[in-house]
Amino acid sequence: MSQALHDALRRKLIGAAAATFLLTVSRVGLAASSQIVAVRVWPSSTYTRLTIEAGSEIRYKHFALANPNRLVIDLEDVQLTGVLQEISGQIQSADPFIRTARAGQFNGNTVRLVLDLRNEVKPQIFSLKPVGEYQHRLVVDLYPANAQQDDPLLALLQDYNKGQLDNSAPRGNKGKADPARPVVIMIDPGHGGEDPGAVGPSGTREKDVVLRISRQLKKLVDAEKNMKAYLTRDEDVFLPLGVRVAKARKIGADLFISVHADAVENRTARGSSVFALSENGATSTMARLLAKTQNDADMIGGVKIAGKDKYLAHTLFDLTQTATINDSLKLGKAVLGKMGGLNKLHKEKVEQAGFAVLKAPDIPSILVETAFISHPEEERKLVDPAFQQDMAEAIMSGVRTYFAQGAVIART
Ligand SMILES: [Zn+2]
C-alpha cells in the first residue's frame, strides 16, 4: 500500500468514525428532546381536552374501540416516564368524557395511551408548535359523538373546528321586536383551560379571578328587572375568541363584557381600565400591546385552525360596526366612571385597539381590565372576595348608567 493510499484510507476511516459518532450524538439528542414534560387534562361539560407536552413534535397514531368505548393513542419515539405513568391521577371523577386513563410501553419506542371513555366520542387530535411558555403539544379534544345540548357552545365549537364560523355574517334572527324580552348581557371571563392568562407574583391566575368576578356580575345582572346574563364559560375551559363572540351573537346578546386582569412587566403599573374596539389603529402603545397579548390567547390556549379564522381576519368595517363602537365607548365610559370609585384608574379614558374578542359587528362590547395582577397589592385585591364583589357591582352600576343615559337596544 502506498503511503498516499494509506493516508486516504485512514482519512476515510476517521471520517466514518466521526459520522458514526455524530449520529450517536444526534440520536441521544433527539431522544432527550422528545421527552414528555407534562400531561394536562381539562374536563368540561362541552369537551375534554388532554394535552401532552414534549420537547419535540410527537408522532402518533390513534384508533377507537367499542364495548367498552376506548380511544387508543400510540405515541412514537417516546419512552414511558413518570409523567405518562401518572396520567390516571390526572383524570377527575367528574370528567364527563374520560373514565380512566393508562399508559404503557407498547414496544421499544412506542408508548400506548388508553383512554376509557364514558360514551362514544368524536376525537380531534392535532399538534401545536411551541408558543409562550409551552413546548410542542399534542392536543386530544374529546367531543361527544351524539350530543343533545341546549347550550349552543358545542355546535359553535364544531363549526369553528371546521373553519365555518363567520361572525361577520348578519345574525339572521330578525323577527318581531319583543318589548317583554329582557336585555341580554353576555359576560366573558377571559382565558381558561390551557390559557391561564396573566399570572401574578404570588401565582394567582387571571383565568380564576376573572371567572369569580364574572359569576358575581351574572348574579347582579340576573337580579335586575328585565335583564338576563349568560357566561361564555362557567368552567375552567379554553374557548377560542371567535367562539366567545359567536355565542354572544347566537344567544342574541345586547351587550358583551369581557372581564380580565392583566399584567405588564413593569410591576408598578396599576389601576383599572376599559377598552373598546378600534376602527383605525390603537389609541396608545399600551392598548395596541394589550390587544396583541389578548389576541394571542388563541395560540396559547390552542386552536386547531390557525390563520383560517374568517372572523379574526375580518377588518372590513361598515356602518353597523361604527355605530356599535360608538355604543361600546358610551358603555365603557359609564363603567370606567364607576370603577374609578373603587380602584385607581390606569387610564381616565376608554382606550381602543383591535381586540378580536370585541369584534361582534352588532353588539356593543367592552373589555374590562379590573386591575393589574402583576402589581402585588392589586393581586391581593383580586383574590379578595369582597373586592371581586365590589368590582362586579361597579361594572353593574356602569351598565345601569349606560341604560339610564338613554341607550337603546336595537331590536331588529
Ligand atoms: Zn386577559
Image: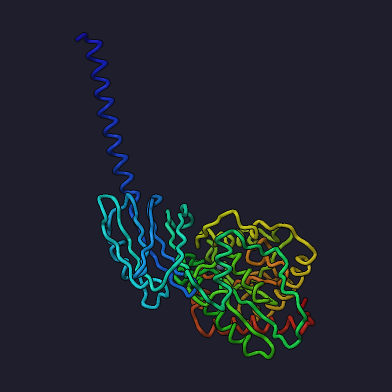
In this rendering, position of residue 57 left or right of residue 224: left
Image quadrant in which you'd find residue 127: bottom left
Q: Is residue 336 visible?
A: no
Residue 341 percent location from the top left of the image:
65, 82
Provide residue 102's location: percent of width, then percent of height: 30, 65
Report x, y in % for residue 401: 73, 83
Which residue is pictured at 46% across the width and 72% down the height?
A: 204
Q: Farthest residue toward the front?
A: 67
Q: In which quadrant of the rendered view does residue 363 lie?
A: bottom right
Residue lying at 53% horizontally and 85% vertically, measured from the top left: 386
Ligand 1's quadrant: bottom right
Give the answer, above or below, for where 11 lies relative to 118: above
Marker count (numbered): 0
Question: Would residue 222 be seen by someone viewing this image from the given angle?
Answer: yes
Residue drawn at the location 19% of the way across and 10% of the way down: 1
Q: Is residue 79 above or below residue 337?
A: above
**Farthest residue, direction left:** 1
Q: As drawn, is 393 to the left or to the right of 11?
A: right
- Which of 263 and 147 lies nearest the eye of the viewer? 147
Taking the image as shown, residue 387 lies to the left or right of residue 24, namely right
Q: Residue at x 27, y 61 (%)?
A: 82
Looking at the picture, does residue 272 appear above or below residue 316?
A: below
Which of the 4 image quadrants contains residue 175?
Answer: bottom right
Q: Position of residue 112 (x, y in %)?
A: 31, 58
Q: Residue furthest top?
A: 2
Of the 4 image quadrants, the one containing the C terminus is bottom right
